[in-house]
Image: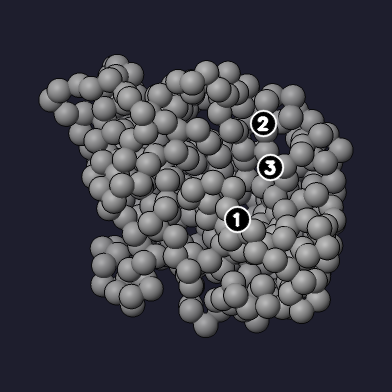
């Protein structure tokens, strides 16, 4: 086994450059044809799939890819270690046969993956067992969205989510830690609207004492724009973002601050398992959402699986190990065999990390370093 040296190894998970890095999925001794939705050990259906297409990013946000860890010496995956577009499409087609309806492309920064539009075209052609297209969306930092918006729309992308942690240029540059101007991200969002994207969301990770003073300003900026703004509690994802509970601003405080200026009314979720709690402006000029994975966990309704850049299937954002599906894809296994491996893997899923964290036993129960968010997406 060959393993690259990793700076500050206590802070990050090792990324090996050999085949079979993750746990071996079980195909089982008797193959079963896919039928209906697949359920895990807690009765949660498999409906959503997040696919990381690159482990690279041009930002160094402190809550995701801090510069002191992800520097020029960091051992990013070689191109041959990434799933190819054909492998991603094949795997997605199999997931769709098992009931997955929503696909989100993530990174790193997914727009850094060369010719991503080709992959989007391939995924847009997949149909569910009922004959419906997949709900295809992408999360981006928006840095090159002005350049890419039109081609993404033409390729068949349905929706966009843009990460934006503030409007104050100094604060934004500090949080992305590469001195990138906020104006360019806002311009990218405008380009997406001009191109015809109807369902755009903006995600703001709120860190207490860092950018929480921007909450109302962000709400004011996007109110009435047709864009849904979502506030995300600072989470302990990965092992290198220096998470501390003192930097978490509870979502109920976010709502309280906005409600003082722009009265809000609660709204029903759009579907079972929606992670964002929805709120509408009382005057009918739009809505916001809060994602409270620290203070109000939603593990009991989580329907998401994640595929890492190198083809590992993770059952939780806070997982410390994945299941190696790249080896199955590259070793001549049939679609039915891979489908059974997915069903068997999901059936054993018992992950509920945020609930454990809430009971103050997460440190004892995590079982090791958590996978970095840049490796499996947010």
Task: State if disc 3 and disc 2 touch (CB < 8 Å).
Answer: yes
Q: Label 2 crowding class (10 Å Cα cut-off): few <14, some 14-19, many 20+?
A: many
Identify the residue at horizontal 52%, vertical 18% (top origin): 131
Q: According to the image, label 3 marks what residue? A: 160
Residue sitting farthest toward the left: 29
**Is residue 310 visible from the viewing direction of this image?**
no
Query: Label 3, label 1: how many angstroms apart (C-alpha)?
Result: 22 Å
x and y percent of residue 76 in the render?
A: 48, 46
Along the line of sight, the residue nearer the viewer: 146 or 220 = 220
x and y percent of residue 254 in the render?
A: 66, 74
Q: Label 3 crowding class (10 Å Cα cut-off): few <14, some 14-19, many 20+?
A: many
x and y percent of residue 249 in the render?
A: 59, 77
Earlier in the chain: of badge 3 and badge 1, it is 3
Q: Secondary structure at mark 2?
A: loop
Q: Secondary structure at mark 3?
A: strand
Q: Is residue 30 left or right of residue 95?
A: left
**Is residue 150 visible from the viewing direction of this image?**
yes
Earlier in the chain: of badge 1 and badge 2, it is 2
Query: Label 1, label 2: how many angstroms apart (C-alpha)?
Result: 26 Å
Image vertical order of residue 314 relative to residue 168, above or below: above
Residue 81 in which image quadrant: top left
Q: According to the image, label 1 marks what residue? A: 268
Q: According to the image, label 2 marks what residue? A: 157
Q: Is residue 191 left or right of residue 247?
A: right
Along the line of sight, the residue nearer the viewer: 17 or 118 = 118
Image vertical order of residue 95 relative to residue 47, above or below: above
Q: Which quarter shows the N terminus? A: top left
Identify the residue at horizontal 58%, vertical 53% (top origin): 269
Q: Label 1 crowding class (10 Å Cα cut-off): few <14, some 14-19, many 20+?
A: few
């Amino acid at each position: 086994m060959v393993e690259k040296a990793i700076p500050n190894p206590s802070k990050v998970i090792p990324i090996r450059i050999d085949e079979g890095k993750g746990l071996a999925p079980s195909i089982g001794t008797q193959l079963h044809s896919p039928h209906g939705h697949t359920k895990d050990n807690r009765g949660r259906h498999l409906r959503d799939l997040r696919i990381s297409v690159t482990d690279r990013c041009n930002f160094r946000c402190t809550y995701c890819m801090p510069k002191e860890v992800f520097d020029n010496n960091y051992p990013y995956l070689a191109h041959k270690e990434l799933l190819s577009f054909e492998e991603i499409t094949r795997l997605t087609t199999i997931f769709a046969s098992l009931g997955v309806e929503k696909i989100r492309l993530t990174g790193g920064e997914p727009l850094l993956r060369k010719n991503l539009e080709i992959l989007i075209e391939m995924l847009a052609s997949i149909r569910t067992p009922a004959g419906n297209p997949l709900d295809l969306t992408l999360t981006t930092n928006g840095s090159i969205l002005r350049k890419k918006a039109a081609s993404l729309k033409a390729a068949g992308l349905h929706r966009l989510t843009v990460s934006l942690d503030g409007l104050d240029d100094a604060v934004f540059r500090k949080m992305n830690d590469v001195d990138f101007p906020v104006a360019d991200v806002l311009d990218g969002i405008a380009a997406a609207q001009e191109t015809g994207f109807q369902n755009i969301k903006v995600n703001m990770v709120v860190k207490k004492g860092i950018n929480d003073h921007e909450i109302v300003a962000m709400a004011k900026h996007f109110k009435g724009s047709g864009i849904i703004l979502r506030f995300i509690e600072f989470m302990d994802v990965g092992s290198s973002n220096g998470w501390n509970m003192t930097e978490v601003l509870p979502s109920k405080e976010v709502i309280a601050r906005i409600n003082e200026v722009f009265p809000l009314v609660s709204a029903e979720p759009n579907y079972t398992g929606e992670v964002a709690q929805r709120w509408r402006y009382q005057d009918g000029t739009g809505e916001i959402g809060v994602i409270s994975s620290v203070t109000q966990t939603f593990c009991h309704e989580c329907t998401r699986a994640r595929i890492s850049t190198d083809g590992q299937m993770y059952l939780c954002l806070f997982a410390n190990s994945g299941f190696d599906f790249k080896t199955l894809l590259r070793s001549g296994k049939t679609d039915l065999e891979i489908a059974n491996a997915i069903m068997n893997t999901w059936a054993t899923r018992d992950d509920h990390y945020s609930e454990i964290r809430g009971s103050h036993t997460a440190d004892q129960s995590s079982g090791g370093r958590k996978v970095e968010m840049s490796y499996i997406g947010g």
